[in-house]
Amino acid sequence: MSEFNTDTIDQVLATSDPGERNRAEHLWGDRLMINIGNVAAWLFPILMIAIVSQVFLRKAGMNQAWLDDAQWWIYGFAMISGFGYAITTDSHVRVDIFHEHFSDAKKARIEVFAIGWLLLPFLALMSDILMHYSYASFSVREGSDSPNGLHGLYMLKMSMPVLFWAAIIAGFAALHRNLMKITQPVLWKTIIAAFPALWFVADRGVYYILWWYVRFTNDEIVSRRIGKEAILDNVLWYGLALLVIIAAVSYWRNRSNSLKA
């Protein structure tokens, strides 16, 4: 009887809480994103209170500009947090009449391609863009358009790249889980599975290292001119070479271990 009750409770939890579905397969990145999502979910009741309060205050002729800003802040933070949560729990809306009829292995292959070659490159690109976007906002201490609004808008914008990084972690965790269903997820196979995103990350990593190298070794150069230095002309290929070397070393080590076994 107790076993039946336990199974029933597990089924109810899996149905009512997407974060509990397939929990045994979750990696640390999955649990991180689910915990962030569970905390961010409490923002929606606060958002409802803010909206209802503003409606009554506006009807009473006491409109509060800061409350309008607060609604946008809460909604924006909660929605971006929910993006990574949906990746982890696979709770995005799927308009697909074919996917549900595929075998588990075929589903996993599709997920690996979609996450590694479509989703992760987008997340990596947006993270890079949002870092510059949030820094620009922070540098001028961007605030509300209204004199009576919330004047720390830069704090909200600074959270955007952080939450996209969390979504990237969730994406890699989902990629790893699906890769495990079709092969052993060793490093070189993971690199192939997420090649466009990792190439972009390697490219940006090399670029920023060289950018700061030029910045620290040439005190007279203007920051805007650094990107035009000759040393930065081929960072795309430097990043590719770095990624290929890492993949080759990983492949060689795995092959050596297999031969020894």
Image (spheres, rainbow, N blue to C red):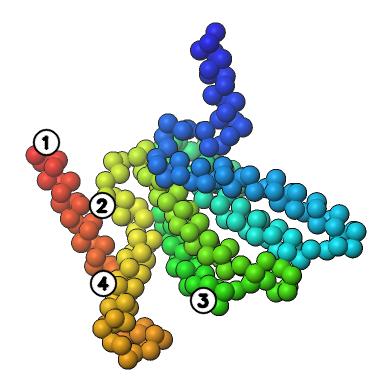
State the residue position of label 2.
Answer: 188
Disc 4, SS: helix
Quick one: which residue is furthest to the top in this view? 1
Q: Amino acid at mark 2?
A: Trp
Residue 237 % position (x, y) = 28, 73
Q: CA distance from mark 3 to mark 2?
A: 40 Å
| Nearest to viewer (mark 3 / mark 4) | 3
Quick one: which residue is furthest to the left in this view? 260
Q: CA distance from mark 1 to mark 3?
A: 56 Å
| Label 3 close to label 4 by CB (< 8 Å) | no
Is residue 14 or residue 199 the one in the foreground?
14
Residue 74 % position (x, y) = 65, 56
State the residue position of label 3.
Answer: 139
State the residue position of label 1.
Answer: 261
Regarding residue 98, the answer to whether it shows in the image is no
Quadrant where the N terminus lies?
top right
| Label 1 close to label 3 by CB (< 8 Å) | no
Disc 2, SS: helix
In this rendering, is residue 224 above or below 210? Answer: below
Mark closer to the chain start, 1 or 2: 2
Quick one: which residue is furthest to the bottom in this view? 220
Say the numbered circle drawn on residue 238: 4
Mark closer to the chain start, 4 or 1: 4
Disc 1, SS: loop
**Residue at the location (24% across, 62% down)?**
244
Q: CA distance from mark 3 to mark 4?
A: 31 Å
Say the numbered circle drawn on residue 242: none
Characterize the local packing of mark 1: few (<14), some (14-19) or many (20 or more) Cα atoms within 10 angstroms. few
Characterize the local packing of mark 3: few (<14), some (14-19) or many (20 or more) Cα atoms within 10 angstroms. few
